[in-house]
Image (cartoon, rainbow, N blue to C red):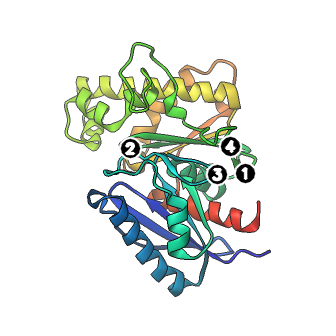
């Protein structure tokens, strides 16, 4: 079976990003649109379905992939956890709503897993047999790619790299656990610790040697470094790809402290065997990964 043109959608907290992936891996980036999360789940999905139906006709799309924040039941597509979008999303039969509205095969994928799939297939992790992905932002997502396939584990939720306990006495995390790497490194923790308005401001202060910014960045990097070193010990990735808004805009200034903290916690593997690199596909990585997941499902992989 040959896959046709696939629509990839990344449902973000602020904007929804869109790409069309052709059979020869050409990526057509389409104009994003405001998610409008403040209007609630029904309004968000109505807007998404309306725009997607237009694209399906215009681009002769044969399948759709949708990257979403949070987690959903793998078999049913019912939302279990939905982060960073207001309104009542838990319990929403997301997959059924999208399939009925679009009248095409639809594949759901966690947005960080979509990022990992995209970067491992077409981006900075291409060619690595085992790759870990980490996305920085309001929260911190993760994913694992092994032999070109996302590793979901027995429960479908494997890959939550930042929800490892790295400090048992640390802050409470949004997941309900105490001391997760995310709790120490997420955007609001970073800005609060540094006394700055935005994450970009924190890294400006870090580059200038501001003590509060240096302390905040080093603490966040230390927590993520411990979590990533654990992943290296257990899964042995050849590449760790770091993306999301801060990494995309800050590049090495953001990634290098995490790289150094990761290496400082790795003792069983030569550091040169593990590349810790900045993502290559930019803000469309999640949408690209969603399209790749839909294409894989269409081909029956």
Q: Nearer the viewer, mark 2 or mark 4?
A: 4
Q: Mark 3 or 2 closer to N-term?
A: 3
Q: Which mark is residue 137?
A: 2
Label 1 belongs to which residue?
148
Q: Position of residue 18 (x, y in %)?
A: 46, 69
Q: Nearer the viewer, mark 3 or mark 4?
A: 3
Q: Position of residue 124 (x, y in %)?
A: 59, 51
Q: Are marks 1 and 4 in contact (CB under 8 Å)?
A: no
Q: Which residue appears farthest toward the top when viewing the image?
A: 169
Q: Spatial distance from mark 2 to mark 4, Cα to Cα? A: 22 Å
Q: Which mark is residue 75?
A: 3
Q: Mark 1 or 2 closer to N-term?
A: 2
Q: Spatial distance from mark 3 to mark 1, Cα to Cα? A: 22 Å
User: How crowded is the residue under tag 1: few (<14 C-alpha within 10 Å), some, or many (20+)?
Assistant: some
Can I make out residue 267 in this image?
Answer: yes
Q: Spatial distance from mark 3 to mark 4, Cα to Cα? A: 16 Å
Q: Nearer the viewer, mark 1 or mark 4?
A: 4
**Residue at 48% over, 20% down:** 166
Q: Quadrant of the C terminus?
A: bottom right
Q: Quadrant of residue 240?
A: top right
Q: Spatial distance from mark 3 to mark 2, Cα to Cα? A: 28 Å
In the image, residue 79 sits, relative to residue 141, either above or below, namely: below
Can I make out residue 270 in this image?
Answer: no
Label 4 sits on a secondary structure element that is loop
Label 4 belongs to which residue?
151
Label 3 sits on a secondary structure element that is loop
């Amino acid at each position: 079976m040959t896959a046709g043109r696939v629509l990839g959608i990344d449902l973000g907290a602020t904007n929804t990003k869109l790409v069309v992936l052709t059979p020869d891996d050409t990526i057509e980036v389409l104009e994003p649109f405001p998610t409008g999360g403040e209007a609630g789940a029904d309004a968000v999905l109505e807007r998404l379905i309306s725009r997607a139906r237009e694209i399906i006709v215009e681009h002769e799309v044969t399948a759709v992939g949708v990257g979403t924040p949070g987690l959903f039941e793998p078999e049913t597509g019912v939302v279990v956890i939905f982060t960073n979008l207001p309104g009542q999303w838990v319990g929403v039969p997301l997959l059924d709503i999208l399939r009925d509205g679009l009248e095409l095969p639809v594949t759901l994928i966690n947005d960080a897993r979509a990022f990992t799939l995209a970067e491992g297939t077409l981006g900075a992790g291409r060619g690595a047999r085992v790759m870990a992905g980490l996305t920085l932002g309001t929260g911190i997502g993760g994913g694992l790619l092994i032999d070109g396939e996302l590793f979901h584990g027995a429960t479908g939720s494997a890959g939550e790299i930042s929800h490892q306990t790295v400090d048992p006495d640390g802050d409470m995390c949004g997941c309900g656990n105490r001391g997760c790497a995310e709790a120490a490194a997420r955007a609001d923790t970073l800005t609060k610790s540094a006394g700055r308005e935005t994450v970009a401001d924190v890294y400006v202060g870090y580059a200038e040697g501001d003590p509060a910014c240096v302390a905040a960045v080093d603490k966040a990097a230390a927590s993520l470094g411990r979590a990533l070193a654990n992943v290296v010990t257990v899964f042995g990735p050849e590449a760790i790809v770091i993306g999301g808004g801060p990494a995309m805009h800050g590049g090495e200034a953001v990634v290098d402290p995490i790289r150094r903290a990761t290496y400082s916690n790795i003792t069983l593997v030569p550091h040169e065997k593990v590349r810790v690199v900045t993502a290559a596909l930019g803000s469309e990585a999640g949408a690209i990964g969603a399209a790749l997941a839909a294409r894989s499902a269409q081909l029956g992989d």
